[in-house]
Structures are given as C-alpha cells and as structure tokens.
Image (cartoon, rainbow, N blue to C red):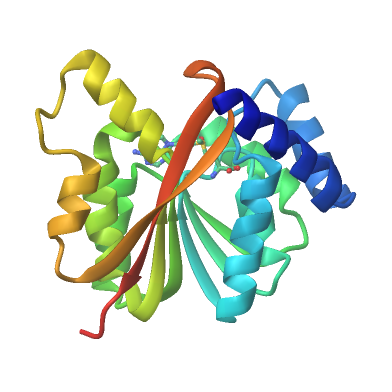
C-alpha cells in the first residue's frame, strides 16, 4: 500500500508541479553549500503555498528555516515570513536563497526566540513547525499562543516522530497526537502523506497535524 501511495505521489509530482526557478535555485545552492536534503517535499511546499494563499495569510512564522525552501513557498504567495533557525550556516545559506523576498530570519533556539515574540505581542496568521522532533510539543504550545484566532498551526513530520518515539520508547504513551488532542485551544486533524524521508526506508508514510486556533 505504501508502494502504491508512493507511486501516486510520484505521479502527482510530475502532473501538478510547475517549474519554479526560485525554489530550484534554493535547492541547488543549499546542496552546493552542504545543507542536508530535508526541506519539505515539493508537493508539501505547494500545499503550504496553497494554504497560506487561501487563508490570505499576511504573516507566517516558521520554526526551522534550513535553506529557506518553505520560507519561499510562503513568501511567494504574499506573506511576510518570520523564520527561526538555530544554525548560523543554515541561516546564511537561507539569506542567499530568499534574497528579494519578504523573509526575516531570527537566529537562535526556538524556545529562546518564541517567548520574545510573545513578549513583543506578535501574532501570526499561520505557524509552520519544522524543527527538532524532541521539542515538537513545546513548539506547538508557543505556536498556538502566537497565532491569531482562526489562524492555523501546521506541524510537520508527525508520523516520523511518532515512529521514532515507538522505537526509542521515549515519551511513553503520551504522544504529540494525544497532547494536541487534549488541547482545548485548537481543533486539529492529521493529514497523511506518502513520501521519502531520510529517517525511515522509502517508500514511507508521514503526515502533519493541521490545527485551527479557536477564538481566545
Ligand atoms: N522548513 C525547512 C524547509 O522546508 O525548507 C526545513 C527545516 S529542517 C527540517 C529543520 C531545521 O530546523 C534545521 O535547519 C535545523 O537547524 C533547525 N532547528 C533544529 N532545531 C531547532 C531549534 N530548536 N530552534 C530553531 N531551529 C532549529
């Protein structure tokens, strides 16, 4: 079944994606500078662009910049992007890749930067979480606080991180899904995806949590 879904994913990629020079240049430059190939996959990037576009998102917060691939996906549909990155090398490559777009990159560990954004009273239409698996819940918690009512929090790599938890036994029975499920501030769903991921053999199942922040 994974194989079948992965085949349809490949078909969808060739049918639905159009050439995008900015994204292609970002990927090539990131590869040339030695960044790991872990940006969102092209169809997921397009999903992010569509979601931000249909929401009319003016401001997007991103946790985990890497080379700025997903930042470009948001900026290209008219959002101002604030992106947090812990690694100065990734930040430098991302700055080259997002040149000319409305993207600011804040250098630091997300759990240091997020409280500062909250202190400043910043609110975003959408938050995209795509950093380390271990802090997913803490990032989600801050993301909800920083999202406007009826805004959206999008958490990537949920299935991969749950499989990792199962394999390592970390976290016990409380998973990112059960924690989000108990969170009365949001209504959430799991969107499954089939695609390659460096952490598990291909073809692999992955997925993201998409949550709408309720009125607060
Ligand atoms: N969103 C990017 C894209 O699709 O192009 C991919 C992000 S990559 C999967 C994860 C990034 O998060 C890496 O660049 C890593 O250095 C960064 N990162 C990891 N832990 C972090 C943390 N605690 N705070 C900020 N950035 C972090």
Who's the residue at 79% across and 39% down the image?
11
Left or right of residue 95: residue 135:
left
**From the image, which quarter does the C terminus lie in?**
bottom left
Q: Is residue 79 visible?
A: no
Viewer-side residue, 216 vs 22:
216
Q: Position of residue 185 (x, y in %)?
A: 19, 71
Q: Is residue 89 visible?
A: yes
- In the rendered view, tell whether residue 126 sits above or below residue 166: below
**Can you tell which quarter of the image residue 148 is in?**
bottom left
Q: Position of residue 26 (x, y in %)?
A: 76, 41
Q: Position of residue 13 (x, y in %)?
A: 77, 42
Who's the residue at 12% across and 58% down the image?
182
Viewer-side residue, 89 vs 184:
184
**From the image, which quarter does the N terminus lie in?**
top right
**Can you tell which quarter of the image residue 90 is in?**
top right
Q: Position of residue 51 (x, y in %)?
A: 58, 68
């Amino acid at each position: 079944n994974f194989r079948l879904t992965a085949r349809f994913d490949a078909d969808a990629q060739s049918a639905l994606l159009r050439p995008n020079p900015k994204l292609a240049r970002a990927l090539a430059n990131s590869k040339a500078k030695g960044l790991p190939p872990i940006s969102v996959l092209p169809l997921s990037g397009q999903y992010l662009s569509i979601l931000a576009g249909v929401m009319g998102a003016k401001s997007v917060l991103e946790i985990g910049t890497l080379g700025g691939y997903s930042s470009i996906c948001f900026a290209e549909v008219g959002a101002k992007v604030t992106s947090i990155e812990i690694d100065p090398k990734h930040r430098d490559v991302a700055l080259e890749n997002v040149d000319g777009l409305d993207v600011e990159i804040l250098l630091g560990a997300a759990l240091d930067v997020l409280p500062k954004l909250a202190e400043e009273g910043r609110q975003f239409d959408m938050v995209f979480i795509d950093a380390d698996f271990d802090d997913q819940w803490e990032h989600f918690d801050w993301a909800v606080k920083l999202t406007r009512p009826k805004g959206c929090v999008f958490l990537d790599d949920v299935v991969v991180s749950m499989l990792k938890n199962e394999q390592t036994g970390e976290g016990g029975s409380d998973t990112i899904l059960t924690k989000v499920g108990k969170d009365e501030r949001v209504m959430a769903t799991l969107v499954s995806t089939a695609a390659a991921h460096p952490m598990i053999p291909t073809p692999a199942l992955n997925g993201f949590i998409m949550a709408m922040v309720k009125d607060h």
